[in-house]
Image: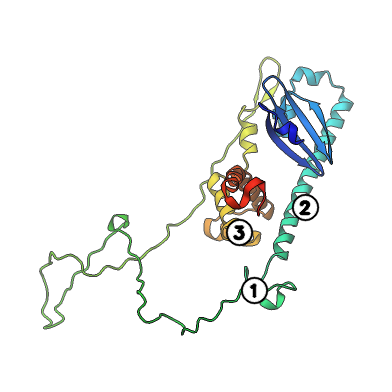
Amino acid sequence: MTNILNLPGVIVENKKQIGETLIFAVKSENKTAVVEVQGGSFRWLEHDRVGDMEKTVPELIAAISPSDWALVPQSILELIYELVRRTDKLEEEMAQLRTENELLKEQVARTSANSSQPPSKNPQGFKPNRKESTGKKRGGQLGHIGAQRKLYPEEMCQEVIHHYPQQCSGCGAKIDQVGNQPADYRHQIVEVPPVQPIITEHQFHPVTCNCCGQKNHAASMPEIIRGGGYGARVTAYVGLLSSQYRQSYRQIQQLMQAVFGIEMSIGTINRLRIEVSEAVSDAVTEALSLHPAFTNGRSR
């Protein structure tokens, strides 16, 4: 296995893990093949259309020409449609099981240190990190540098309102003139803008060919549908909340609804989280390979 992957000029692509079987494409200058690895053995599967490994079932069916479909008996067509239906159902069940598995992992790892769960419900053997006493009193210590609220530069303000005194606080006389002295005190009120999701709808209109009667859709239809129903920023927010801020799936679901007005299921959150993980996997692997603690692909 190692010798195959280390051959000069060989590129490994499209890795797929199906149970205990690993399938990946091996590409050289003049040949492309697929390798199936199970246990300690492997076998070559001759295959020049490696891109088919990434295609969905509807895309594979759409790639077959009407003339080829005309040669297939009706009984075989019905069998194909039934198999496709069962495959779709199995994929849905698998996605649901993956989501439930992630939720169970999340519940098992939940403690009073990373959630609002009381310490009495911590798992057996859990030891929270306790800070050692420094012997100092609570609050600010003598001689510490005070911290004040940060003021944003005036150029960032959408509106600047100038206030002038109307009456003298000493003698009570009315003040008519406006001074030209700069303000000696500034106060800012910060507000978040109203958030409303940006929704783009794609409508695909069928057009029937005048020559053969074939009903056609736009060529971009499979690519747009395969891209999912959420944009890059929504996906990034889900990834940020689940990784950096360690929010549970339920919390992410509630936050996306409350803050952005976006409704999404637990399964969708899990799918978006996986997309983010796969998108940054190469960068993470490269970063770990450069870190001294992860030499030779394993930690010390």
Name of the residue lying farthest toward the top: 211
Q: Which residue is mark 3?
A: 252
Residue 276 on image: x %, y %: 60, 47
Q: Which residue is mark 1?
A: 128
Residue 289 on image: x %, y %: 60, 45
Q: CA distance from mark 2 to mark 1?
A: 32 Å
Helix, strand, or loop for circle 2?
Answer: helix
The image quadrant where one finds the C terminus is bottom right
Query: Would residue 243 be seen by someone viewing this image from the given angle?
Result: yes
Residue in the picture at 51% in, 47% down: 198
Number of other residues with Cα within 10 Å of mark 3, as a class: few under 14, some 14 to 19, many 20 or more: many
Sequence-earlier tag: 1 or 3:
1
Residue in the picture at 68% in, 14% down: 211
Number of other residues with Cα within 10 Å of mark 1, as a class: few under 14, some 14 to 19, many 20 or more: few
Residue 148 on image: x %, y %: 35, 71
The foreground one among 183 and 225 is 183
